[in-house]
Amino acid sequence: MKIYDVMSVDIVCAKKDTTIIEVATRIVLGVFNGIAIINDDGMVIGIITIIDILRAIKDGKDINNTTIGDIMSVNPIVIKQNKDIEETIDIMDKNRISMIPVVEDDGRIVGVCSRSDILKEILNERFVVIGRKKTTTTTIGEG
């Protein structure tokens, strides 16, 4: 199985001039482990995680005015989308990281793979879903 089979493609990225409070809010609301930091070309230039934000708070940084460019980890580990899951697990384990930005051959971000993405896929291999998901749609103003 390849990374493109399990990665999350609906991802949130940020630019390095975003404030810490803005990123912290997105992480908490989105229930992410961290966020990839990209340049204008979509290339991953850094990563920021919850622990980076907590360290900034502990160090007394003004999270309302300090940008993530000041605290992000630069040159993070990235993985190409055609890599095997086993290799990704190895990288996560050896480097003690919980998520890896997934990139195309040219280096542009196309997704993120987390430990839970891999585990969900492995667990789902043993189950078959039959039927349809039932949804309810409500239009505002209709009674």
Image (cartoon, grey):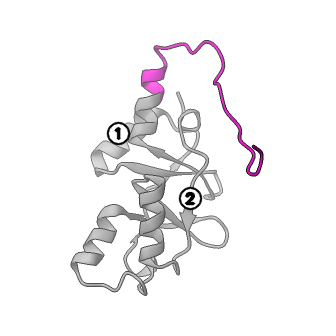
* Dominant secondary structure (helix, strand or loop) of the stretch shown in magenta: loop
What is the residue that sits farthest to the left in this orientation? 58
* Above/below status of 61 relative to 122: below
Q: CA distance from mark 2 to mark 1?
A: 25 Å
In the image, which residues are magenta?
121-143
Name the foreground residue: 93 vs 57: 57
Q: Which mark is residue 12?
A: 2
Q: Amino acid at mark 1?
A: Asp
Classify mark 1: helix, strand or loop. Answer: helix
Rendered residue at 41%/59% (across/down): 28
Q: Residue at x 40, y 72 (%)?
A: 72
Foreground pick, 1 / 117: 117
Q: Is residue 45 magenta?
A: no
Image location of residue 52, percent across then percent down? 32, 68
Instruction: Tell me where residue 10 appears, x and y as whole percent.
Output: 61, 49
Residue 40 lies left or right of residue 72; in this view the side is right
Say which quadrant the C terminus sits in. Answer: top right
Residue at point 43%, 87% (across, down): 65
What residue is shown at x 64% (from left), y 64% (from top)? 42
Q: Is residue 134 magenta?
A: yes
The numbered mark, 2 or 1, whose residue comes first in the sequence reads 2
Measured as percent of width and height from the top left, residue 84 is found at 49, 33
Looking at the rendered structure, the secondary structure element under dot 2 is: loop
Residue type for callout 2 = Val
Q: Residues within 10 Å of mark 2 (few under 14, many from 20)?
A: some
Residue at the far right in the pictured view: 142
Count of all numbered marks drawn on residues in the image: 2
Q: Which mark is residue 55?
A: none
**Residue pointed to by mark 1:** 90
Q: Position of residue 8 (x, y in %)?
A: 55, 44
Residue 111 in the image: above or below residue 40? above
Residue density around tag 1, few if under 14, some if 14–19, many if 20 or more, within 10 Å = few
